[in-house]
Amino acid sequence: MTSATTEINRAEASSEGPLNPGLLNKMDAYWRAANYLSVGQIYLKDNPLLERPLTLDDVKPRLLGHWGTTPGLNFLYVHWNRIIRERHLDMIYVIGPGHGGPGLVANTYLEGSYSEIYPHIEQNRDGIKRLFRQFSWPYGIPSHVAPETPGSIHEGGELGYSLVHAYGAAFDNPNLIVACVVGDGEAETGPLATSWHSNKFLNPATDGAVLPILHLNGYKIANPTVLARIPHAELEDLMRGYGYEPFTLEGHDPATMHQKAAAAFDKIFDRIAEIQKVAREGGSTDRPAWPMLIMRTPKGWTGPKEVDGKPVEGTWRAHQVPFAELREKPDHLRLLEDWMRSYKPEELFDEKGAFREELADIAPKGRLRMGMNDHANGGLLWQPLKVPSFRSFAVKVDTPGATTAESTRVLGKMLHAVMEANMDTKNFRVFGPDETASNRLQDVITRTGKTWEAETLPVDENLSRTGRVMEILSEHMCQGWLEGYLLTGRHGFFNCYEAFIHIIDSMVNQHAKWLKVTRQIPWRKPIASLNYLLSSLVWRQDHNGFSHQDPGFIDHLVNKKADVVRIYLPPDANTLLSVADHCLRSKNYINLIVAGKQPAPQWLTMDEAVAHCTTGLGVWKWASNDNGNPDVVMACCGDVPTMEALAAVMLLRTQAPDLRIRFVNVVDLMTLQPSSEHPHGLSDEEYDLVFPPKVPTIFAFHGYPWGIHRLTYRRHNHDNLHVRGYKEEGTTTTPFDMCVLNNIDRFQLALDAITRVKRLASKVDDARQWYSEEIQRHRLYVSENGEDLPEIQCWQWEPGQSS
Ligand SMILES: Cc1ncc(C[n+]2csc(CCOP(=O)(O)OP(=O)(O)O)c2C)c(N)n1
Ligand SMILES: [Mg+2]
């Protein structure tokens, strides 16, 4: 759009426009009804239609919720309804300022979807009373656009992710339009600021459309917003700079605004249709300037203009409940009654309290209603992912440790096959912040290339307008796109450097909450799990050092509801394949897989790997000599710790030849937690069979040692569990020196075993001496030569006398 057209939009001040007077009146009444129901939800528990004068008994004891953003959202909803009806659009909403929950509840009620999903919220006086009462009420519904809200894929509680979710929903959904409201405060967040760039990844021929609406109501909770206080032309330039065609809608007089909004939406939806036509029929490959709308309206529009002598409408004071203290200040009760009556409820609801038919009639019908759109209940559209047999990618393991492989490279071949198998349904994508090849998954890229709608140069490799591997240097975008993709019923896989996945800690919190809540909502159908592969791990940061060393995402996920999280640390390629197969098929979980990319020894045949992953943890007999009666359990979890623990077993053959060692590997971390705490947890009886009470366990763990203590603190013999792990010691050094710096190296583990087994007390002094000599020798060698000792570099597992 040119600035000239924008000017016309801004200048239009008459109530003339595309809406005929009848429709204009109905749309305004519809909007008033939504506003009335929104205020009612925030304030009232009785007298829902104001059929008698309002009294304090009608008012809720705790006034909770947000008014300020709500009238703007309600205004948009009624206009989207007109567009959907007229154009038969398949459209969903994403509301960034999710605190405007009352508005979305009100609108889905008015269109009938709410009562269909929750029949006790009937279309009459009692239904409205229940609708009001349940809002922000104990055991009622939350104040935000939560999973409970029909038509929502986005709660909007934590601001910043609306636009990225909207794009995730639109990928591979060519007939879908996602209308996305971005709060002007929300627009200040990092993730939202980057989300505008999603338009360089959206293919107009094969993806749907996203319509961003910047809700410029001028304020956040307590401050003006940045975008509301820069010159309008600068704001439009910013949007143009992001590659959009900005439209502006500004004002506050309802009749004028309805006409201007209808005119703007007509142009915008024409433009979307035209862009899609040119790409789909004309074959254009130009990156289009998609339309976006800047809507500049007052915060708390149509609410009280002044309270206690202070301006409220059009200010930050309208953000939450514009006034409370109804008990203390009698005029506040009148203020509320006048405010609610200003919407003329008697014109909106009939004598039984049903929304008047002629008004209800202007909403879309059936599944075109945004509250009933299947895309917003993605589990309804979910199709199983076709996962070809992972066994065909197995690494051949004749004897443990004889073969070397890069585990993630092997996984890349499997992901390539998954991509291939699902090309017809186009419901699988891989996401990564510029690291997919670095994580050695490059084979998956070769099938379709990487999504890219911006300029390409001859030097570029594997960029494609129809690529299904999505790379952008923003973990937020990868996470948000994937969430939007999964929430609308598809499948995906996110690979990331281990240290930097923390960037999305907060986003995964929100997704975990969403999954937890949806499990309790019968009409929300399960969606595909969110699968993470973390590679480029803490122990092998040969290039990058300390900044790249942080295995703490595991601890972060352990906090989440046990029903939702699964954490796997496969020790080799075959276990990784088996775990990945399981995760790709699963539903409603957050699956974390932690696996290295460096060449590493392979331990298990495919059959053994499957059996090991099925139990989640197990004794490796070929590395044990305990004959069912161990002196010590040598346990490990993670690929590097597994290798160090095995090397320690070999050292102990000479340091303590008669020591009976049981070797245990843990692949499914949550098996360690009691079964009362996690569905994968072993019962105490099962746990005691593996880790016998009274026998010391030396545990080499990939992550921070406390993680293991935390999971096992209720287990028998916890006092005798001695965990080694990452303790925040790191730098750019050799792989083995990293282990030494953190005391998880083979010498330390062997010394630990000798120290902890009481009958070896007489050997402890010698063992300590031996340990310091070995470590000294190692230190001298690495500082002199810049690499690990030859016997460390060339170390190989040698079978002993196993049990
Ligand atoms: C990431 C994040 N930080 C802070 C908050 C607290 N918060 C809730 S609403 C809000 C202001 C939002 O302003 P805006 O996006 O402009 O929404 P609106 O004006 O439409 O209410 C803030 C800061 C939050 N919900 N999420
Ligand atoms: Mg705002």
Image (cartoon, helix red, strand yellow):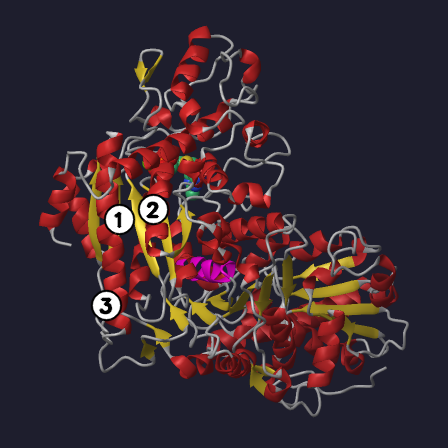
Amino acid tagged 2: Arg
Q: Nearer the viewer, residue 615 or 303?
A: 303
Say whether residue 556 is left or right of residue 462: right
Q: Where ligand 1 lies, by image quadrant?
A: top left
Under 8 Å from ligand 1: the CB of mark 1? Answer: no
Q: Name the amino acid, label 3.
A: Arg
The reply to whether the residue tagged 3 has its Cβ within 8 angstroms of ligand 1 is no
The verdict on residue 441 being magenta is no
Which residue is disc 1 drawn over? 265
Q: How many dots with numbers?
A: 3
Provide the secondary structure element on which disc 3 rests: loop
Q: Which residues are magenta?
A: 477-488
Q: Residues within 10 Å of mark 1 (few under 14, many from 20)?
A: many
Q: Earlier in the sequence, mark 3 or mark 2?
A: 2
Q: Which residue is mark 2?
A: 82
Tag 1 secondary structure? helix
Q: Return the x and y of residue 708 as percentages of the image width and height.
A: 69, 57
